[in-house]
Amino acid sequence: MNNMKKCISCLAAVSALGLITVPAGCAQDRPGVVYVMKPMPFYISGQVGGELMQGLSIKNAGGAKNSVDPGFRTSVSIGADLSDYVAAEFETGVLGNALDTSSSQPLSAIADRAYLYQVPLLANVIFKAPLRNGITPYIGGGAGGIASTLYLHSPGSWSQDTDVTFAYQAMGGIKFALNRNMEIGLAYKFLGTPDHTWFPNDFRFVRSGQMFTHSILATFTWTF
């Protein structure tokens, strides 16, 4: 009788242990249940606005500053929301400026008109703080390369040369949701590059110092 009681006690203990452990195992692979992974949201964003470049230092003219007129910037970004708070994207676009070539400027010695166009290719990381009212402030930064083309006009002819260097940027802004897929916003971007060299084997040789550009942009983002 005592042995039978012991067997019953053992079976009860084993059954209780089974009740504790089996549901956990079944939860991992329940028959008939399909687990669907949420797709990663991708987006495309367009930005357009004005920019100001700090005075351009011309190193082969003793480091004299050449004034730069206000210009424009257009950008296109394609990215993915890695989470509600982090996104990664690729950005390109165009920045354009006219350079002052009046008699008091270093570039006046080689050109009567000068224009600078830049095409950045940047990888960015964005950190977001979404709010319940559809407003999302954000900050971010990126790095990559930039192709900078200098156009010079002298009486009767145009000439151009392109320099490719490293580039980096910092950004911040705010977005306002129109619906689940569209946002508008306002952004600030700071773009920096190291020294540039144009026309290295020519009388038009130009070597500049670092370039720093500040942009204010209106943005539109579509998530799909």
Image (spheres, rainbow, N blue to C red):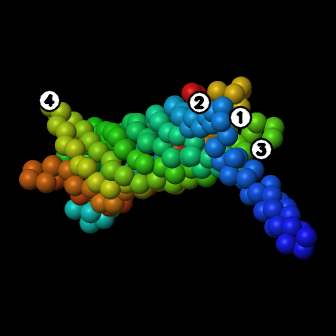
Question: Where is residue 221, by image quadrant?
Answer: top right
Query: Dot 3: within a 10 Å radius of its alpha carbon, few (fewer than 14), some, or many (20 or more) residues?
Result: few
Query: Where is residue 28 shown, x and y percent of the image?
Result: 65, 48
Query: Where is residue 92 shown, x and y percent of the image?
Result: 40, 39
Q: CA distance from mark 2 to mark 3?
A: 17 Å
Query: Which badge, 1 or 2, is on the more N-terminal residue?
Result: 1
Quadrant of the snapshot with the N terminus: bottom right
Say what amino acid the circle numbered 4 marks. Answer: Gly
**Relative to 34, 152 lies left or right:** left
The residue at which mark 3 appears reads as: 131
The residue at which mark 1 appears reads as: 176
Q: What is the secondary structure assignment of the residue under circle 4?
A: loop
Q: What is the secondary structure assignment of the residue under circle 3?
A: loop
Q: Is residue 124 above or below residue 224?
A: below
Say what amino acid the circle numbered 1 marks. Answer: Phe
Q: CA distance from mark 1 to mark 4?
A: 50 Å
Between 45 and 115, the one lying in front of the other is: 45
Mark closer to the observer (1, 4)? 1
Q: What is the secondary structure assignment of the residue under circle 1?
A: strand
The residue at which mark 4 appears reads as: 156
Query: Which badge, 2 or 4, is on the more N-terminal residue?
Result: 4
Residues marked 2 and 3 touching at CB (< 8 Å) = no
Say what amino acid the circle numbered 2 marks. Answer: Thr
Query: Where is residue 48 shown, x and y percent of the image?
Result: 52, 32
Residues marked 1 and 4 touching at CB (< 8 Å) = no
Q: Is residue 220 above or below residue 193?
A: above
Q: CA distance from mark 4 to mark 3?
A: 58 Å
Residue in the image at 19% along x and 46% along y:
110
Q: Looking at this rendering, what residue extends furthest in the bottom direction?
A: 2
Q: What is the secondary structure assignment of the residue under circle 2?
A: strand
